[in-house]
Every structure is written in C-alpha cells, then in structure tokens.
Image: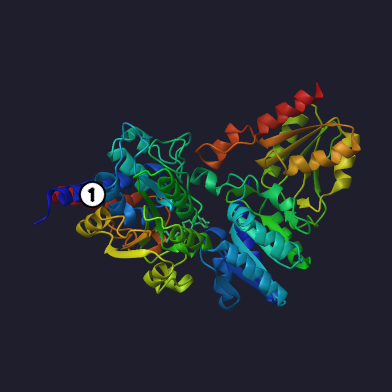
Amino acid sequence: MISPKIKELKHIAKQARKLMVETLICAGCGHPGGAFSSIDLMTALYFDIMKIDPHNPQWDERDRFILSKGHSSIGLYTILHLRGFMDKETLLTFRQDNSLLCGHPDMHKIAGVEMSTGSLGHGLSVGAGLAMVGKMDKKNYRVFVLMGDGETQEGSVWEAALFAAHHKLDNLVGIVDRNMLQIDGCTEDILALEPYRAKWETFGWHVEEIDGHNFKQIKETLERCPVSASRPTLILANTVKGKGISFMERNPAWHGGGLKGDQAEIALQETNAALVED
Amino acid sequence: MAKKSMRHECAKSLVELGAKYNEIIVLEGDLKESTQSIQFQQAYPERYIDCGIAEQNMVGVAAGLALAGKIPVVQSFACFISMRTCEQARTSVAYPRLNVKFVVSHGGISPGSAGTTHHAIEDIAIMRAIPNMAVLVPGDAEEAKQVLHAALAYEGPVYIRLSASDTKDIYTERDVFNIGRATLLREGNDACIITTGTMVAVGVEAADQLLQKGVKTRVIQMASIKPLDHGIIEQAAKETEAIVTVEEHNILGGLGGAVCEVVAETGGVRVKRIGIKDHFSDVGTATCLLNKEEITVQAIAKNVLGMLK
Ligand SMILES: Cc1ncc(C[n+]2csc(CCOP(=O)(O)OP(=O)(O)O)c2C)c(N)n1
C-alpha cells in the first residue's frame, strides 16, 4: 500500500514537471535535464522533509537548502512556487528581461533561495559553514546541499568534504544527483568518478544510496538524516537526466535549451497525461 | 550588415592553426559546444583533452604541458578562467612565463539571462593586473581570428576574451592586427571614442551619428588591452577635446582604467568611462542589460556632446 504522503509527493512532482515545461516554453531557454532529474528530490525536501515556513522564510530554526547545481534553478523556483513562496506569474517570468528569476538563483531576489549559486563546486563549502554555526550556536537545523555528479569533479567539493568530516558536521547532508551525465557526455567518459560511493566513504562521510525517483526510498532515507552521529551524510541518488520527458531522458543534448515547437507539444502532453493518471 | 559568431569563426581558425602548430593541445572544461572547442576535438581527437568540471586542475595541467614544450589552448567561460583559476593562471602560468593560451568565451554580460555567476565583468581588470599576461579582446569574427593567429605566433601567456553574442563585421582580411597596437577606425580631432571587444560596432556607429551633427570623432579599437598602445592614447589626449571609453566590463580596472592611467600621466584631456557601473547585473538578455547600463550608441553620442560643451 502506498502511504497518502507518498501519493501526495508523487502528485506534487507531476505538477512541478508540468509547470517546469510551461515555464521553459515561456522562457525559450534554460537547463531542463538536471532539473527534471532532481525535481523528485526537491519535492520531498520541500513538502515533507525540511522544517520551513513560507510565511517566515527567514525563520531562524529552519532547515537550509542550497542548490549548489544552480543551473537547475527552474526546479527550485517551481517548488518554491508550489510551496507558496512565489506566485505563478512570477514563475513564468523565468529568465525574461527584468525578471527576478535569474538563470542561476539570486538569494536577494526571491525569498526561499538560501544562497546565490551557479558556479559549480561552491555549495558544499557554504553548507559546511552554515552547519558549523548550527553546531557552535547549538541550533537544531539541518543543511541540505544538492550537487550534480559532474559538479563533484571540482576540487573544492573535496576540500569541503574533508572539512565537514573533520569537524564532524553530522547536521550537513550532501545530496548528489547521480544522473551519470555532465554537458560533454557521461561523467565516466569525461572524468571518471567511480568508485564513487567509496570516495565519499573514505573521506569520512556516511553514504546512503537511493533511487532518486522512488519517493518511498527518498522519504525514508532523508527522514533519518542525520543518519550517523558525528559524520556528515551523503545521499547518493541515482537518477535519470531529463526524467519524465521521453525525448530528454538520458540525452545529454538536453542539458540546456528551451522548449519549442513539436517538442514543446510533446512535453506538455506527457506531463499533462501523467497528472491525469492520478 | 552580416553578423557572425566569433566563437565559431575562431574555432575554425584554431583547427587550421592545428595543422601549422603540431604542439597545440586544446583543453576544455566541459563546455565544448559553448566554446566550440568541439571543432578541434573532431579534427584532432588525439590533441584534445576534456578536463571535465575542474578548471583549476585544467590550468595546472596546461602549465605542465607547456613546460614539456606543448602549446596548450585552454577553453572555458571567461568567468571561470579569470576567477576560478586565477591563481593557477598567475602563479603557474604567468610567473614562469609559460606558453599557455587562454581562449575564453562568454565575456562581459554576453551570457545574458544565465545571470551574474556567468558574466565576466571583472576579467579584463584581473588578467591585466598579472605581469607577463597579454590580454586581447577582439570585436568581431575577423579580428578574433587575427588575434588568435597573433597569440600563437607570440611566445608567452595570452588571455583572449571572446563574446557569446554574434557581432557585426567591422574588419576585413585587409586589416592587420598586431599585439600591442590599436586600430584606428575613424579619423577626427573633436573627440575620441576608444572601444574594446564587441563595443567597437557601437563606437563606430556613435561616431557616424556624431559626424552628422558635425562632430568629427576619432574611433580607436583597443583589442590589445595589454600590451597597451600608449602612443595612440597620448596622441588622442593631445589632439582631441574629449575621450570616451566603452567596454562590456566594470568601469573599474578595464579599458577605461587603462586609458585613464595613461592620460593621468600625460594630461591634456578629460576621460569618460562607459561600462558597467560597479554593480552586479539584473536579469535579461545581453541587449537588455546593455541598454540598462546605458552602453548604447545614443548614450555614447550624448556623452561626447556633453563633454564638448
Ligand atoms: C565552475 C563551473 N564550471 C563550469 C560550469 C558550466 N556548467 C554548467 S552545468 C555544467 C555541467 C554540470 O553537470 P552536473 O553537475 O552533472 O549537473 P547535471 O547533469 O545534473 O545538470 C557545467 C559544466 C559552471 N556552471 N561552473
């Protein structure tokens, strides 16, 4: 039996995918692939896992989320809209002249965006800093940092990994959207990451591997975070780039680009059909 | 007027140069379509390394390749090379004066609505402040090709900044680019507009409009930001009544800064710097952002007229 919460999360993710398609059509540009691979994770975080209050975005005790893979902004913006941080009109201005919604998120433009990102490999360090204050000031918040797998080729990610383990930041949760693709191809062909899980483990992290599209696994695992006392947690989420749009799935060509013409039609049909199923 | 992508044209030239210089090795940071280094990869797969999303390592590796006699051409976006790899570029490349060429795309605010993280409005200032580093900012496809040729004929580190935007043709094959030399595009002794990069087209158009109002405006394109053509600036300071600099860059430390440094020592004329006024951008296309910043033909003409009053 599927629990009502999981049913609800699935439904929200379907709504999110449809809204992302609509917004990408309006914008004529954007980064679909990595947003569709990570939208299920973001849905679970914002609608189930994280302690947040859309009416009080600066609430001191809130859990923090950093979208280190800032190019997946369309996913974050859509979730922030669905969660009540911004209206649909604002969402649909994504990347247009004078919009508040930059291609890579700006924390001073939209409530709910915790950190300005877009240059890869910055987020985990910033998350470690936030987590450090949580420890110093004895706060209970957790810090979630979503990274791309390609992003973790950056050396700075591993400096942060060392730091977080050294300082026993068990309130820090790194999530890697392991969709196997970066821009120029498969991570294993460009700059291999495997054995990937073992790398994080040797760096002193507790690793949980999940299917990043299976809400039961996402929920059960993220709920338990921090999983290990005195160690940061890394969620290795196996995902499909472009998940939910047939022609985008596993296709590196859909890292970036707008939706137009026939493809826009197909994407709309597919995301609509998924919603009707419910 | 024809518009071209300097990235595509430059990449084509790099493939041609690959035949002439066997030592060229192209290094890419997971942006091969955007930089168009894919063209070199297709022509010379064995002389191409996609280093992934690890720019600092890429520049360090380039230094090693150069130490061993190769000519590394490092490609990525202007923001990541000038800022993420700044110390590798300075300490491992410029300091030992290694023969590394940085050919970076998406200079200035040309990434448009991708946003501030992807804009490079500081890169000219940063790279210019590094000893031994030549800094070249071409304005159209032809100039970009010539800049690339000159950079490869030159021994030592060079930073070439290309735009993501398509550009109007200003130069032809009859024009000649030399490192350390500016090019004179319009004669005139009333005022002088000095441009760099893609701003050349805007500068020329402003001068043509001013001429219709009877104001003879000299236009100088300063693609070679460093080494800088001091002579041509000193001459403009002596012979014209006002200098306006135009760049797709912060007004601090870039072309405007470089021109002011020369004029401050020679004296003789006021300089107005047009560029991004030391703040991070809003959201919009490149054109929208240029309009907002008043980096336009109209704004340049207005500034020239204002200074001549
Ligand atoms: C420092 C830095 N280098 C390069 C880029 C350009 N870039 C944007 S997204 C991307 C690929 C990211 O791949 P991955 O992290 O796997 O993200 P996903 O596949 O989930 O979209 C690159 C190279 C960047 N934003 N920042």
On the picture, is A75 further left or further right than B173?
left
Residue A222 % position (x, y)? 27, 55
Identify the residue shown where x is 62% and y is 53%: B83
Q: Chain of mark 1?
A: A
Observer able to see residue B138: no
- Indicate the amino acid at tag 1: Lys
Residue A23 % position (x, y)? 35, 43
On the picture, is B56 further left or further right than A55?
right
Identify the residue shown where x is 74% and y is 51%: B128
Image height of B249 relative to A157, above or below: above
Identify the residue shown where x is 37% and y is 60%: A231
Identify the residue shown where x is 17% and y is 47%: A8
The residue that disc 1 covers is A14
Image height of A14 relative to B297, above or below: below
Residue B226 % position (x, y)? 78, 52
Tag 1 secondary structure? helix
Observer able to see residue A37: yes
Front residue (pair B295, B251): B251
Query: Which part of the image, by quadrant, shows the N terminus of chain A?
Result: bottom left
